[in-house]
Structure formats: C-alpha cells, structure tokens
Image (spheres, rainbow, N blue to C red):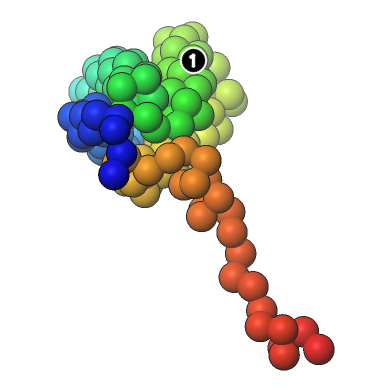
C-alpha cells in the first residue's frame, strides 16, 4: 500500500483533449490549402484562421503537458515536444505570411507528422505509471527463448 496521495487524472484528460484538437486541425490544414490552390479562394483565410487556432491549441497542449508532468507524474519529454511543435508552428505561420512556400510546405508536413505522432503518444500514457517504467516497457524488445538462440 502506498502512502502517497493519488495523482489527479484531469491533467492527462486535458492533454488528450488538446492533443486531439491539434491533430484534427493539423489534418485539416492541407485540405484548406489544397482547396485554395483548386480555386476556392476564401479557403486561404480559413487556412490562416486554422493555423492560428492550431498554434493556440499547441500552446494549450504545452500547458497541459506541463500539468501532466508536474501534477500527474508523467514524463517531461511530452512538454518539451509540444514546446518544439509550438515554435515550429510560429515559424510556419511566419513563413506562410511571407509566402516562402519552399519552406512553408515541407515544414507543414513536419508539423502534421509531429501532431499526429504526439497525439498517439499521449493516448499511450498510462495514468499513474512511473515515467521510467513506462519508457522501459515501450523500448523493451521481445526476447527469444534460450532454445531458439542455441
């Protein structure tokens, strides 16, 4: 029996909600940009607004990840990852406003991949699990029986 109080679950739930929001907004961005390129010009404004909302969602994810780390006992690496994603989103918006498409489009692909990967990582977190134990189980490879190695 542990004498430590139970860790709150709400920070992890908050992080999961913001992670899904970020992942869905990142998924919508290529469709909005593609619609603009197809000739539906109002979608460029929608692309811009979605980028602003996406960046706000990433900032909320940073805050939620910090709460998961400090209050929920989760790993700190999630807050670091979302912080990096936030910096990349700010750079992405700046490049988009400057019309530097040679960097804007590949960086957008990277933002999309990161957002989707981070969302799956957040849903793999076990509430109340020790961060070192969770990392050990993720990196552990199945071992072969002794007879198979001989």
Residue count near mark 1 (Cα–Cα under 10 Å), binned few <14, some 14–19, many ≥20:
few
x, y percentage for residue 30? 36, 37
x, y percentage for residue 49? 24, 17
Q: Which residue is drawn at the image coordinates 46% and 38% (left, top)?
A: 131
Viewer-closest of 90 and 60: 60
Question: Going by the image, does 50 lie left or right of 142?
Answer: left
Q: Which residue is drawn at the image coordinates 32% and 16% (left, top)?
A: 63
Quadrant of the rendering where the N terminus is positioned: top left
x, y percentage for residue 65? 36, 25
Viewer-closest of 28 and 54: 54
**Numbered disc 1: secondary structure:** helix
Residue projecting furthest to the right: 150
Residue 61 in view in this figure: no
Q: Where on the picture, by quarter, is residue 52?
A: top left
Quadrant of the rendering where the C terminus is positioned: bottom right
The residue that label 1 is drawn on is 87
């Amino acid at each position: 029996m542990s004498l430590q109080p139970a860790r709150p679950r709400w920070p992890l739930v908050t992080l999961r909600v913001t992670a899904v929001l970020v992942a869905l907004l990142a998924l919508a961005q290529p469709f909005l940009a593609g619609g603009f390129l197809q000739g539906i010009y109002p979608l460029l404004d929608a692309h811009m607004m979605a980028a602003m909302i996406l960046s706000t969602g990433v900032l909320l994810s940073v805050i939620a990840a910090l709460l998961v780390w400090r209050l929920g006992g989760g790993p700190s690496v999630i807050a670091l990852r979302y912080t990096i994603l936030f910096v990349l989103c700010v750079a992405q918006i700046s490049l988009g406003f400057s019309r530097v498409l040679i960097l804007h489009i590949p960086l957008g692909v990277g933002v999309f991949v990161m957002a989707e990967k981070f969302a799956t990582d957040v849903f793999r977190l076990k509430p109340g699990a020790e961060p070192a134990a969770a990392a050990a189980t993720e990196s552990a490879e199945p071992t072969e029986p002794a007879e198979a190695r001989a």
